[in-house]
Image: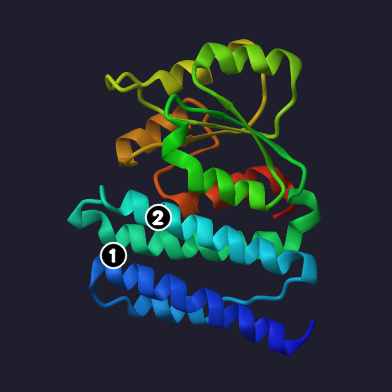
Amino acid sequence: MDEYIIDLIKILIWPVLFIVILLLFRKPISTFIENWKKAEFKVDKSGITVVAEAVRNITEASIERAVGVEENEKDRYIEEGFKGVSDTITKIQNYFDKIRNRKILWVDDHPEWNINEKSAFETMGIKITWCLTNEESLNKLKNENFDVIISDLFSDEGYPKGFDLLEELKIKKIEIPLIFYTGRVTQNLKEKAEDKGAYGIVDSPASLTSKVLSAIIGSEI
């Protein structure tokens, strides 16, 4: 691929993320900078726009969610944000054809909260089907196949309805990777999700895209 195009991608993407993180957290981010310098951008012509658009959407989603990040969680958020974006870029580069045309079932009663994340997946050629309730999603699964399920974990009242969905999938022997996307992942929640058989539980947009792509790509990574 033309070296000019590779350089152009680096010029466009790196400053955007750098400025966003700097404005959000206003603190030294030497680890972030050093890691980002190691990232490689070797994508074919069909993947260039995908990488740029996906990163843009993930960044916008990160800005929206950063408002609720507690002070003692910011270092983790920065580190996971970089790692998730870097992993996402690598997976798009290496498995672009495998990612396209896959299908995600997204279960969340507030789809308006995840517009940028949805756009990031759609940029990669992934189809999103939205369901507002567990019941609706189970009915959808009767007639349609999906590669990954994304679900919120808690209801507005704080009930962990996502665990109910996971249990129903087990009962019905539906073996589709389920990833919880929630407001904040604690060690306790992570352990519970793993014990109950979730593929993963994440609380940042970049971690979500990376985890979903891992589930899609499967054993090839």
Residue 170 in view (yes/no): no
Query: What's the residue at 36%, 57% (across, down)?
Result: 63
Which residue type carries mark 1? Leu
Residue tagged 2: 62
Residue tagged 1: 24
Where's residue 34, x and y in %? 43, 81
> Pointers 2 and 1 in contact (CB under 8 A)?
yes
Using the image as rendered, state which of residue 221 and residue 106 is in the foreground. 106
Name the outermost residue toward the left.
71
Using the image as rendered, state which of residue 206 and residue 164 is in the foreground. 206
Where's residue 35, x and y in %? 46, 76
Where's residue 157, x and y in %? 27, 19
Q: Is residue 143 above or below residue 75?
A: above
Using the image as rendered, state which of residue 206 and residue 65 is in the foreground. 65
Q: Is residue 16 above or below residue 208?
A: below
Q: Quadrant of residue 74?
A: bottom left
Viewport quadrant of the C terminus: bottom right
Which residue type carries mark 2? Ser
Using the image as rendered, state which of residue 43 and residue 116 is in the foreground. 116
Q: Secondary structure at mark 2?
A: helix
